[in-house]
């Protein structure tokens, strides 16, 4: 009876998860279809330009997002029944993101103009800039907080279906790497435009003038989560930038391809679960009736089972990659076999970290969540400059996988100790 009751209580979340997995499947399937095409048409060198520019801009997106995808989601979920409080959170978060976008735009200008390595990739980086603009104007955290993440995913899917196929038309030679970067970035702007129109037409928020006091409050609440995201970026985005100083563009292309395939598989299955169950767990935790623990336990086993299957699929599939992609990508299978160990750790760390320390936890456990990524960042930084100078992309693959394992173990330790 208890199991049946639990299933009925969480039926909406389970249905939303299935919808999101299907939508996420389309969202990830399109890039997965496009990725081999780009890898073949651009070659390892051309794809290296795209991979480097995406890493630079995605690193700056972390500053613009500032952890709001977790902190603002939770704050919106808690006040979802209070229109004025919800609107106040919305507009102050938007103001904070625009402030951060201005800062990151200045940073990008300085890098492209004054740093030689970034100058080399300058055209591709500029073409990828719309991704940064789209990040500031996209409010996934709002849709997630009000329980309409399925709708947001539909908007994102429509944008990708409409725009990504244009890559097959406009990208034909290695010299088209700038167009390849631009078309991938424009998807973010398209999603932002559609979602903004929907919010305005449906009057989902009322106008509440942002104030510096409340903007600072939103930044303060989100700061620990930003630090954790910034720390994570040391071994996700920054590592590609470091490779740019030690490796050829071709090797960066192979590494970026393997890493993006691994992340795409993880996002395909873990992200929908997190988007649906994180706000639900946060809501239940605020009621303090113990239901959040039961739901957390169910989600934990589901995530670990799914991510274990992803690891097996990546390991088995790695043996055929070079023959499928051509001689430019010989050696990429080694990186993929190293990455195959990461999805289990990513799922383990995500459940005990985001859903546990943040969703169930409190301000103190959120700080512990941040501290885990501090330790991971320091570990990754040391490993990075120990392994990459000697082993290049193979060393980078080892750094990423080892760091994900460290994160998973520390999240589990802190959850058991404090919750």
Image: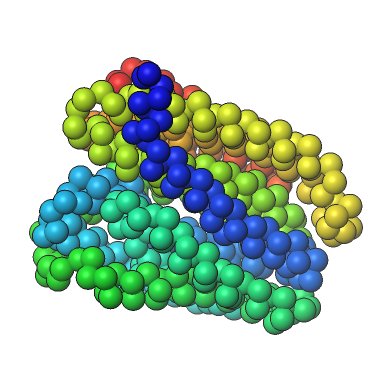
- Left/right placement of residue 52 relative to residue 132 reads right
Residue 63 to residue 170: above or below? above
**Residue placed at 54% from the left, 29% from the top?**
304
Point out the image quarter for the C terminus.
Answer: top left
Colour scheme used in the picture? rainbow
Which one is nearer the viewer's eye here, 233 or 389? 233
Q: Residue furthest bottom?
A: 170
| Coordinates of residue 412 in the picture (x, y in percent) | 43, 23
Relative to residue 313, is residue 192 depicted above or below? Answer: below
Q: Is residue 108 above or below residue 67?
A: below
- Residue closer to the observer: 135 or 223: 135
Q: Nearer the viewer, residue 345 or 271?
A: 271
Residue 39 quadrant: bottom right
Note whether residue 394 is visible: yes
- The image quadrant that residue 98 belongs to is bottom left
Q: Exactly how many numbered labels are in the figure?
A: 0
Q: Is residue 113 left or right of residue 289?
A: right
Residue 354 image offset from top left, x and y in percent? 38, 37
User: From this viewpoint, is residue 103 visible?
Assistant: no
Relative height, residue 98 to residue 338 (above, below): below
Task: Indicate the position of residue 8 as horizontal and vertical percent values.
Answer: 37, 33
Q: Within the image, what quadrant is residue 194 found in?
A: bottom left
Split into 4 quadrants, where in the image is the N terminus? Answer: top left
State the residue at coordinates (73%, 43%). Answer: 335
């Amino acid at each position: 009876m208890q199991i049946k009751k639990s299933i009925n209580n969480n039926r909406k979340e389970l249905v939303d998860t299935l919808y999101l997995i299907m939508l996420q499947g389309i969202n990830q399937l399109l890039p997965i279809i496009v990725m081999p095409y780009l890898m073949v048409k651009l070659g390892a060198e051309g794809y290296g330009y795209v991979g480097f520019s995406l890493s630079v801009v995605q690193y700056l997106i972390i500053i613009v997002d500032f952890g709001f995808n977790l902190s603002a989601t939770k704050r919106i979920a808690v006040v979802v029944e209070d229109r004025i409080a919800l609107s106040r959170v919305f507009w102050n978060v938007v103001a904070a993101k625009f402030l951060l976008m201005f800062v990151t735009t200045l940073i990008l200008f300085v890098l492209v103009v004054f740093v030689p390595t970034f100058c080399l990739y300058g055209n591709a980086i500029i073409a990828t800039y719309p991704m940064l603009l789209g990040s500031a104007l996209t409010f996934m955290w709002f849709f997630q907080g009000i329980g309409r993440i399925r709708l947001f995913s539909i908007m994102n899917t429509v944008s990708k279906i409409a725009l990504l196929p244009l890559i097959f038309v406009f990208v034909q030679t290695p010299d088209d790497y700038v167009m390849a970067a631009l078309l991938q970035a424009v998807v973010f702007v398209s999603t932002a435009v559609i979602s903004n129109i929907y919010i305005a037409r449906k009057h989902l928020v009322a106008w509440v003038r942002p104030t510096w006091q409340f903007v600072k409050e939103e930044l303060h609440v989100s700061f620990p989560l930003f630090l954790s995201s910034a720390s994570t970026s040391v071994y996700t985005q920054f590592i590609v930038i470091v490779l740019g100083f030690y490796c050829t563009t071709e090797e960066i292309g192979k590494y970026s391809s393997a890493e993006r395939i691994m992340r795409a598989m993880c996002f395909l299955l873990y992200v929908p679960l997190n988007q649906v169950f994180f706000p639900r767990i946060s809501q239940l935790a605020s009621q303090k009736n113990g239901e959040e623990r039961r739901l957390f336990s169910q989600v934990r086993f589901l995530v670990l089972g799914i991510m274990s299957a992803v690891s097996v699929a990546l390991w088995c599939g790695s043996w055929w990659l070079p023959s499928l992609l051509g001689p430019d990508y010989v050696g990429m299978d080694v990186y993929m076999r190293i990455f195959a160990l990461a999805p289990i750790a990513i799922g383990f760390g995500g459940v005990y970290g985001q859903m546990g320390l943040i969703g169930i936890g409190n301000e103190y456990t959120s700080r512990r969540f941040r501290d885990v990524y501090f330790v991971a960042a320091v570990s990754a930084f040391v490993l990075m400059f120990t392994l990459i100078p000697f082993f290049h992309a193979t060393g980078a693959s080892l750094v990423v996988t080892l760091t994900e394992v460290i994160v998973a173990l520390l999240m589990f330790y802190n959850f058991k100790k404090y919750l």
